[in-house]
Amino acid sequence: MLTRNLTERLKPFLERGLIRAIPTPWQLVQGSLEMAPYVVTPDAGDRSRYDGARFGHPLLRTPIVLAQIGIDHLQIGHGLFVRSAESYFKHLMFVYHEGMPTYDLQLVQTVPNGLERLRAFAEAIERGATPRARRQRKLIGWVIPEASRYRHEFLRNGGWIDRAERFDYPST
C-alpha cells in the first residue's frame, strides 16, 4: 500500500524545486477532474498508437488491461493514491504512451526505489524471466503494437528511466 504521506512521497520534487508546495486537497480534486477525460475516453491519437495490435481497440484492450492492473486502473485522477507501486509499473507496460510518459514516471519516483523497481519489472517482462512475466509479455503484445520496441524506450541507455533518474523531463 502506498500510504506514505504526500510530503514524504513528493520530497524528491520539492527538494529540486520542481514543485513549490504540497498540493492542497482542493488542488488534488482539480487534478483528478483534469485527468478524468484521459482515463475515461480514448484521446485523438489513440487509434494510431494501437494500430496493428490484435486487441488494440479500446473495447478489446480495456478488459485485458483491467484484468492485469486491477481496480487501480479505474482510479480517475492524479494517481497518487493507487494501492500499489506495481499498478504504476503495469500501467506503464500495458498502456501505450506517446512520447516520454513524464507524469507516470514522476508517480513512480514517489515510491521507494520506484524507478529501480520499474526497470526490474520491465526487464523481467522483456526477458520472459518467469512464467508470469512471459504471460504479461504475451498480453502486452496483444494490446501494444511492437511492444518490445516500446519497452526498449524505457530500458535503453539514456532511455526514459535513465532520464527520469536524472529528473531530465521534457519542459512541456
Image (cartoon, rainbow, N blue to C red):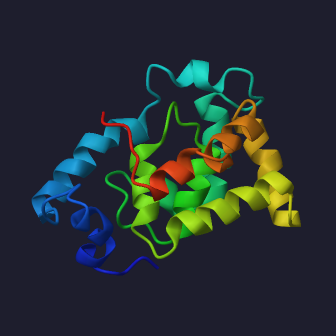
Q: Residue at x 32, y 67 (%)?
A: 12
Quadrant holding the C terminus = top left
Left/right placement of residue 52 relative to residue 70 reads: right
**Residue at the (23%, 49%) spot, across then down:** 31
- Above or below for 93 versus 58: below
Figure quadrant of residue 2:
bottom left
Q: Quadrant of residue 143?
A: top right
In the rendered image of this protein, does residue 10 appear above or below residue 137?
A: below
Q: Is residue 74 visible?
A: no
Q: Looking at the picture, how far across and down is residue 26, in whole percent?
A: 11, 58
| Residue 70 x %, y % | 58, 61
Which residue sits at x=88%, y=65%? 131
Res 171 → quadrant = top left
- Where does the image place residue 112, in percent across and percent down from the top left? 47, 76
Q: Position of residue 162 (x, y in %)?
A: 55, 52
Q: Judge from the rendering whether residue 68 lies leftward or rightward of residue 54; answer left or right.
A: left
Give the answer, above or below, for where 101 lies relative to 24.
above
Image height of 142 relative to 27, above or below: above
Which of these two is toward me, 141 or 151? 151
Q: Nearer the viewer, residue 143 or 114?
A: 114
**Residue 38 versus residue 137: which sits nearer the camera?**
137
Residue 88 shown left or right of residue 9 in the figure: right
Q: Depth check: 168 or 114 in front?
A: 168
Residue 88 in sight: yes
Tag count: 0
Q: Residue at x 49, y 38 (%)?
A: 100
